[in-house]
Amino acid sequence: MSQSIEAEQAVASTPQAAARGQEPFSGEENPFEAMMARFDRAAELLALDPGLYRVLRQPEKQIIVSVPIQRDSGEIEVFTGYRVLHNTSRGPAKGGIRFDPKVTLDEVKALAAWMTWKCAVVNIPFGGAKGAVVCDPATLSITEIERITRRYTAALIDVLGPDSDIPAPDLNTGERIMAWIMDTYSMHKRHAVTGVVTGKPIEMGGSLGRREATGRGCVISIKQAAQHLGFELKGARAAVQGFGNVGSVAAKLLAQEGAKVVAISDISGAYYNAEGIDVEDALRWVKDHRYLAGYPRAEAIGGEELLTLDVDILLPAAVANVITRKNARQIKAKVICEGANGPTTPAADRILEENGVFVIPDILANAGGVTVSYFEWVQDRAAYFWDEETVNQRLETMLCRAFRDVLSVSQRYGVNLRTAAYMLAIERVAAVHRLRGLYA
Ligand code: NAD
């Protein structure tokens, strides 16, 4: 990839922030409240020991750092950086770093906890973390972004490490930024440490299959759901919200499985074709025009309308809080596969459950990404790299097992898949706490 394209990606606008209109989260949409509501319900059903409940509700470590950099103008500016380690009982902390002007410590805390549960659901030996720098990449040059990245890494040098805390890309950070983190960390350690971050370029220890892993994981879960519910993926109708990394890969793989992708959307608009959209053709359109806007071989529809189409599978793969109490009753899909993090609010959960919609929750549905990040870390540590087929096969094995585990908890306790996924995750983390005991 050329330097200029990477630079463009590193300063790309923030669709999530744009989509939520830069408004602070509130009420139904507060991510910390949404996560805690699910955690509390699962903990109650598990009759979790009150002491352990108190331990798991709190992050282990919350770090706030100042990130001073020299702007290209020569002026010194100080940004704020966060890193939250929620729980490291099962292994090193793992979680992305986002650059976002509106990010708050509360949001980072929720996202860190989310990672603990996600890693436990797929049973990889990581705890949960999340990091952020409060900055707007759209107003920064590529060299300023590099300085922020390196200074933030240096400020956290004692926290990060392949055995302690392993960042990954998130909102507005990509493989270019991961390469700078690896380099800064390695310069401090005086030798190359590839396993300190995942989501790196392939040339420097990244994993084959990482880019497609989240979308691929969504389709693996959808196949499992179809098998469980007794319908064929071949000929099933699907609508996909978001046509970025997750949505476009999932749409392509769904089409390869014989499903009819009747609707797709991105921040620029939504498109419908009852006969099925040629996903490869839409991808070529986006490659040439950046957005779906103006896509000629489908009819333009409203973004909201996409969510309530008469389809078998709905795959929200864009932003949080799109399925709410306002539209949940109109949803006709049999299966919702949450490619995005937190697309459904707790209030919508209840309505979907009443209506018998089978929701594959985010901490299971989109865990393919962190699973292949785990594979990347394993390959870096072994300094032995797998071919793409091996990566994909192992991903499928792990996600199918996670799906079966969650389904079995759901059947045993008579709860939906989301509650079951939280119960499974909390129990796995709690079990390790009980075995390790409380160090005093
Ligand atoms: P991306 O930036 O590559 O793509 C996001 C897509 O959503 C873009 O096509 C954008 O135009 C579209 N979009 C934004 N707002 C929209 C809106 N209001 N309506 C319709 N489309 C809209 O991001 P991504 O990596 O594909 O991530 C998508 C979601 O999946 C996010 O919630 C992310 O947190 C989650 N996720 C991603 C990964 C991963 O490995 N990439 C892993 C786990 C979870």
Image (cartoon, rainbow, N blue to C red):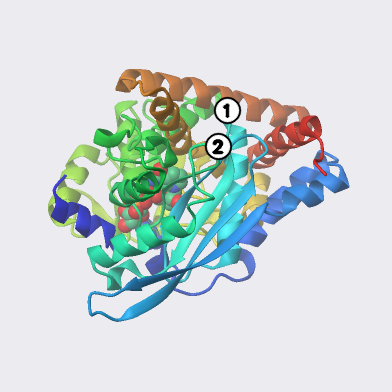
- Asked where in the image residue 325 lies, by quadrant, the reply is bottom right
Sequence-first tag of 1 and 2: 2
Q: Quadrant of the C terminus?
A: top right
In the rendered image, residue 249, in percent from the top left (x then y), is placed at: 32, 38
Q: Which residue type carries mark 1?
A: Phe
Q: Nearer the viewer, residue 320 or 201?
A: 201
In the rendered image, residue 278, in percent from the top left (x then y), is placed at: 22, 39
Q: Nearer the viewer, residue 213 or 224?
A: 213
Mark 2 lies on a secondary structure that is helix
Q: Which residue type carries mark 2?
A: Leu
The image shows residue 270, relative to residue 246, as above or below, that is below
**Residue 364 circle label:** 2
Mark 1 lies on a secondary structure that is helix
**Viewed as shown, does residue 89 lie left or right of 6?**
right
Q: Which residue is mark 1?
A: 403
In the rendered image, residue 244, in percent from the top left (x then y), is placed at: 31, 49
Q: Residues within 10 Å of mark 2 (few under 14, many from 20)?
A: many
Q: Residues within 10 Å of mark 1 (few under 14, many from 20)?
A: many
Residue contact at pointers 1 and 2, CB within 8 angstroms: yes
Q: Is residue 20 visible?
A: yes
In the rendered image, residue 307, in percent from the top left (x then y), is placed at: 45, 53
The image shows residue 169, relative to residue 145, as above or below, that is above
**Viewed as shown, does residue 253 lie left or right of 310?**
left
Q: Is residue 242 visible?
A: no
Count of all numbered marks drawn on residues in the image: 2
Say which residue appears at 35% left-offset and 51% top-offset: 184
Q: How far is the residue under mark 1 from the one under mark 2?
A: 7 Å
**Residue 95 circle label:** none
